[in-house]
Amino acid sequence: MATDYDTPRKTDEELHEESIEELKAKRAEIASGQIDVDEEDPENVELPGADLSGEELAVRVVPRQENEFTCSRCFLVHHHTQLARGEGAKALCKDCA
């Protein structure tokens, strides 16, 4: 979980003031699974576990080119100038090396 270091910190007294019931209620609100729906565009909501098997790609997929390689750790296709070491199935990009 990301930490926002600019938010004001709670003192020890403030931390002990919160009751167990309040903490449980906050946890229940977070875990409730409610989804915020944009009232203007309800069709663009992605539901967790939704069946997308009938969907088609909206982008054109280009095969890997001669001057590109697939990193064996991150599985991204990079330009050959990003090759740190290895060849073929053992190639690593500079980010993963």
Image (cartoon, helix red, strand yellow):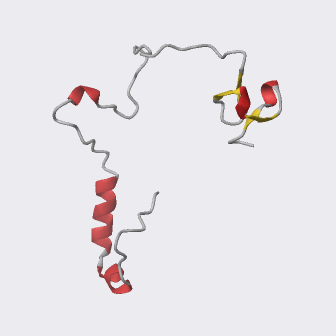
Q: Position of residue 40 (x, y in %)?
A: 16, 32
- Residue at the front extreme, as displayed: 81
- Residue at the right extreme, as displayed: 86
Please tell me how many numbered marks the rendered image carries.
0
Q: What residue is at 20 percent from the left and 29 percent from the top?
A: 41
Q: What residue is at 28 percent from the left and 55 percent from the top?
A: 29
Which picture quadrant has residue 15?
bottom left
Q: Position of residue 97 (x, y in %)?
A: 75, 43
- Residue at the left extreme, as displayed: 39
- Say above or below: 1 vs 17: above
Q: 46 left or right of 76?
A: left
- Say above or below: 25 vs 33: below
Q: What residue is at 66 percent from the left and 30 percent from the top?
A: 75
Asked whether 30 or 7 is in front, the reply is: 7
Which picture quadrant has residue 49?
top left
Q: Position of residue 54 (x, y in %)?
A: 40, 13
Which picture quadrant has residue 82?
top right
Asked whether 82 or 96 is in front, the reply is: 82
Q: 68 left or right of 12?
A: right
- Say above or below: 18 vs 89: below
Asked whether 85 or 41 is in front, the reply is: 85
Q: Position of residue 70 (x, y in %)?
A: 70, 26
Q: What residue is at 34 percent from the left and 52 percent from the top?
A: 31
